[in-house]
Amino acid sequence: MLICMIFVIPSFLGCRQKPRQSSQLPVKFDPKLSAEERMESLYQLGVIAGTTGKLDLAEQQFRLVLKDNPKHLEANHDLGLVFARKGQIRQAIEYFQRSLEINPNFPEAYFNLAISYHNMGQLEMGEGYLDRTLELDPTHKKALIAKARLAMRRGQMRTATKLYAHYVKNYPTDMDIRAVLGNLYFQQGLDENAKFELLKAVKRNPTSKVLYHLGVIYHRRNNLKRAQKFYDKALQKDPNHVDCLVSMGELFERVGQSRRALLHFERAYGLEPENQYIRKKVVKLRRG
């Protein structure tokens, strides 16, 4: 079982599976333990130390393991994670590479190399390792998210949508990503796809953005009662959501409730006084 250490760079998160934690670290080993069992115990001490933030102790334990067995896959990799957590990226890369010399088909090492090179500003190198991660493990959760976020930064919405859809297919209970996917569909005018994802996401992730987009979808379909319901909930989450205030104003104007429409347009105008569309609506409704 491997150490779980988090080191963050923009849109990336490196993490291993989390082991069971212990409140105390054993200081003595059973003399009946074999050399292999003793080495594994040292490794687990490093794992526990790393997950509790004791990085120097984790480094010490992993080095003891590697002293006896330089080809211990997990110890090499996890020592790389320790260095990454300490900000010593070049040393981290060295140990991730060592783990790949032992197992050249180890997706987690490629993923953490991607993070490391990205952190050093070598984006193309990092993306190459990210691609290799997904070649070896097409359902790698963090690699899929990282690849999709890179696509979004580049404005490659279709690519990002495809990646997030693949992610959701494999991890259907991740409502945060369903919300992202639904919002992406919405931005592309794919209302049916957006509604499917957002209605699932809103049950566990009722953000103002998700609620507003659902309101717009129902507004477009002339289901004004349901649209108003979602707009109301969005404004409860974010009373200063300008787009939602405008949409609500348009909805009330459409059904002939001019006073309520004016109220929402005035609130929006107070937040964006330079917005000429909102200004014209306020002037029109004030004139009656």
Image (cartoon, grey):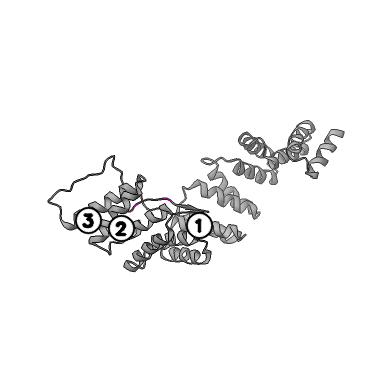
Q: Is residue 265 above or below residue 184?
A: above
Assign a secondary structure to mark 1: helix
Give the number of the mark in front: 1 or 3.
3
Q: Residue at x 50, y 55 (%)?
A: 145
Vertical placement of residue 147 versus 254, above or below: below
Q: Position of residue 270 (x, y in %)?
A: 75, 36
* First to last magenta residue range: 1-6
Residue hosting label 3: 39
Q: Farthest top residue?
A: 259
**Residue hosting label 2:** 75
**Amino acid type assigned to the residue bearing label 1 in the image:** Ala
- Residue 197 visible to the viewer: yes
- Magenta span dominant secondary structure: loop
**On-image quarter of the C terminus:** top right
* Residue 267 counted in the magenta span: no
- Tell which tag, 1 or 2, sits nearer the viewer: 2
Mark 3 to mark 2: distance in Å?
10 Å
Read off the residue under disc 1. 146
| CA distance for labels 1 and 3 | 35 Å
On whether residue 3 falls in the magenta region, the answer is yes
How many residues crowd around disc 2 within 10 Å: few (fewer than 14), some, or many (20 or more)? many
Q: Residue at x 45, y 60 (%)?
A: 116
